[in-house]
Amino acid sequence: MEKLKKMIFLSLLVSLGLALSIIESFMPVPFIAPGAKLGLSNMVILVTLVVFGFKEALIVGILKSLLFTLVTGSISSLFYSLTGTIFSSIAMFIVYLYFSKVFSLVGVSIFGAVAHNTAQVLVASLMMNNFKIFSYLPILLLISLFTGYFIGLASIFVSKNLKKISTKM
């Protein structure tokens, strides 16, 4: 029964991540940097990492990316999304596991945002066969500080409440 509850809970997290991705894709972002987003669905991955662990967070992120591609029909975005999800999940896991005494979830989230943007620029440079696109990275990294901070603060609130709920189940 516990396994079923966990699977249902993770399915709900995937659905929430997908819904946040869809909502975010409709939001006009008033940034100078084209393609920059808040990364609302990354909050779901970070919360999953805190509440359930790395394997589950990676599964939630990958499923969210695959489903978002199916919903939007944008195959090229799959490469960006999957790579960003995998890199950011690994970065957040390492920072959370080994440096949680130094960094709060805000710091973990910022590292995840930096890894996500770095991975996406890497994919873009490989797809376009143009490494000059890395000149765009400093702008994205600066934006990562703010978006990572916002997502980290929200994740602290959500994960505290989600831990309370999951222990009652």
Image (cartoon, rainbow, N blue to C red):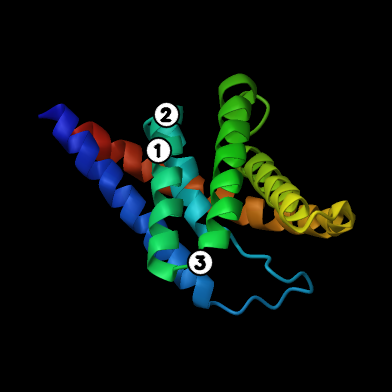
Where disc 2 sits, the SS reads helix
Q: Position of residue 26 (x, y in %)?
A: 51, 77
Work out how far the residue at label 2 is from the one at label 3, CA to CA, in angstroms: 26 Å
Q: Which residue is mark 2?
A: 55
Are the residues flagged by discs 1 and 3 in contact, CB closer than 8 Å? no
Where disc 3 sits, the SS reads loop
Q: Residue at x 84, y 59 (%)?
A: 136
For the C terminus, the image quarter is top left
Q: Position of residue 31 (x, y in %)?
A: 73, 73
Q: Which residue is mark 3?
A: 74
Are the residues flagged by discs 1 and 2 in contact, CB closer than 8 Å? yes
Q: Residue at x 58, y 52 (%)?
A: 79
Where disc 1 sits, the SS reads helix
Numbered disc in front, either 2 or 3: 3
Work out how far the residue at label 1 is from the one at label 3, CA to CA, in angstroms: 20 Å
Q: Residue at x 84, y 57 (%)?
A: 133
Work out how far the residue at label 1 is from the one at label 2, CA to CA, in angstroms: 6 Å
